[in-house]
Amino acid sequence: MPTTDELKSIASQTRRDILRMVHAVNSGHPGGSLGCTDFFVALYHEVMKPDAKNFTMDGIGEDLFFLSNGHISPVWYSVLAHYGYFPVSELATFRKLNTRLQGHPTTHEGLPGVRIASGSLGQGLSVGIGAALAKKLNNDKSIIYTLHGDGEMQEGQIWEAAMYAAANKVDNIIATIDVNGRQIDGDTDQVLNMGSLEAKWQAFGWDVMHMNGNDMQEVVNGLNKSKTLTGKGKPVMILMKTEMGAGVDFMMGSHEWHGIAPNDAQLEKALGQLEQTLGDY
Amino acid sequence: METTLPMSIEKVSEDKDTRSGFGAGLHELGKKNKNVVALCADLTGSLKMDAFKKEFPDRFFQVGIAEANMIGIAAGLTIGGKIPFTGTFANFSTGRVYDQIRQSVAYSGKNVKICASHAGLTLGEDGATHQILEDIGMMKMLPGMAVINPCDFNQTKDATIAIADIDSPVYLRFGRPKVPNFTGGKYPFVFGKALKFFYGTDVTIFATGHLVWKALEAKKILDEKGISAEIINIHTIKPLDVEAVIASVRKTKSVVTAEEHQMNGGLGDSIAQVLAQHFPAPIEMVAVNDSFGESGTPEQLLKKYGLDTPNIVEAAEKVISRKGN
């Protein structure tokens, strides 16, 4: 069982990887990736602990994770690599021709750890529910985790899925929304004010909890608590408050770093704020 | 041998709807394969999925009027080894959920069977909002997606059962009205294989779906006119039986295609592409020509939009006249 300090150490390296990956190809989405880093590190290393060496598409008997907001692929790739799904050196191929690390995650190139393509928003919750239903049919007690952006809540399919899961008591799924309040065009409140996500998900019949997504101990505690809410007849929703760009001071506080890469000077400045703990790829 | 083929094709039962063939096939499949699951978006009766639902309630998922969610759940169910069959009208099975199919099913390589009823004009009185005539085109453009448009009850039933054994996404298109039932037995469904009903030497008629029976009717009229028509049913539009297409046209050197679909993107379009690349020959296409449908009875609509037996006869005579000397 890794200590919180060990998880923080992995997170620091993950943030360095994210910045270096997007810088190398001058494209990609660092903001949301940095914001969700603590979540990914805790989920894989502390909560799910999947068998990386024997990846199967069906994942019988193990917890599964689906990334619905596929644009934050850099954080997922880094965590998958350090967890052991594929060589860390492969992070250098991100978004380059013939890579398995496509701009948005896909099963198409056979990257271990990925079970569905995502990028076009709003689809991952439905997929997660389907996988959860398959678990139930298979008498498999493991749990399905999904992650979504808060801007993604503007997609209608999310609410179709929300309604279905509650009505059918899909209680082996834990969905998390990255509530950073930002989307490409600006603050979510400005682009399309969604009102209270808590009230909406409660009204849709989900068990809703809150979590600070940028405090490692709180993420670990929150995810562990969410597991205790499964199996009680309701799907579980974690509203995870994060800061877009978390870990790099000049990337926080706006939507500006949603989808642009740092230049050389900015990269150097950002890396200066993040300790190299596991070695750069 | 060509001469051993019958002089006419006989019906093997009373007229039946192809959607009932789907329902019967799905029910049989449910008994044979415990990994088969079914999803429906509030059209269980219309899709004839009741028997499956009744016998296998744990494997039937009523998703309500939420087709995008249905496709996503189906994709997810494959992760864990299930073989999902989704059921709704063809319009809501394709155009409404194209991006969900594209990303979560086709690009993700998921073994989902998208089963679509009430395709084409023969939906009838509900009119153009529901009469999708673009679905074959949309679905065949998706990499890795198989497209099947069976012609009668038996073929739809057999196709439904057969696609459970194909490990890839499939679009299975069928319809609402009762139509002649004449395949099976000597005319089995084999995925990806053209089904020849009659040999001929003057023209090849490639037909799919409800227009196969019309093509067989046209054959009789053409016989009387002294025209020898080869009648081939292309139920699997993708992957297309390219060898069968070329072999037939090498002999007849002229082609009619017949389908209940837009000319753009349909069977005719697929045949034309093959011939242009391998064996150029004149083609006439019996299809809807860049138009929406409207309310009416199936027979009235097929007549008004030029998809009836006389249209196939006329197309055959015209294409023969276009052959080079």
Image (tube, coloured by chain):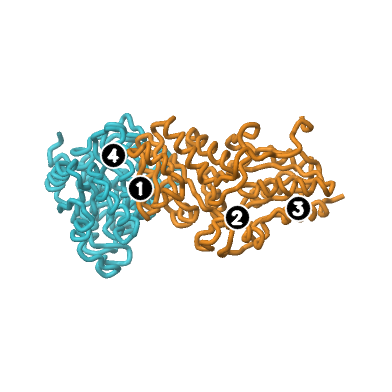
Does residue A264 show up?
no
* Front position among marks 3 and 4: 3
Q: On the same chain: label 1 and label 4?
A: no
Sequence-earlier tag: 3 or 2: 2
Which of the chains bears the disc numbered 2?
A: B
Residue at 20% in and 63% down: A196
Residue B14 seen: yes
Asked whether the beta carbons under mark 3 and mark 4 sit within 8 Å of each other, the answer is: no
Question: Is residue A189 shown above or below B267?
Answer: below
Q: Distance of mark 2 from mark 4, alpha carbons? A: 41 Å
Residue A230 image-quadrant placement:
top left
Outermost residue toward the right in this view: B325
Specify the amino acid type for callout 1. Answer: Gln
Please, what secondary structure does the residue beneath circle 1 have? strand
* Residue A251 image position (x, y, % from top left): 24, 59
Residue B234, image x and y in percent?
A: 64, 43
The amino acid beneath tag 4 is Leu
Dot 1 crowding, Cα within 10 Å, few <14, some 14–19, many 20+ = some
Disc 4: which residue: A64
- Mark 2, residue position: B261
Same subunit, tags 3 and 2? yes
Instruction: Select label 1 or label 4 by which is in front.
Output: 1
Q: Is residue A256 left or right of residue B101?
A: left
Neighbor class of circle 3 (other Cα within 10 Å; few <14, some 14-19, many 20+) is many
Which mark identifies residue B62?
Answer: 1
Task: Estimate the spatial distance between the alpha carbons at disc 3 and disc 1, rounded to whole Å.
Answer: 44 Å
Q: State which chain is coloured orange.
A: B
Tell me the CA gap for discs 3 and 2: 18 Å
Between label 3 and label 2, give the one nearer the viewer. Answer: 3
- Residue at 50% from the left image edge and 42% from the top image edge: B22
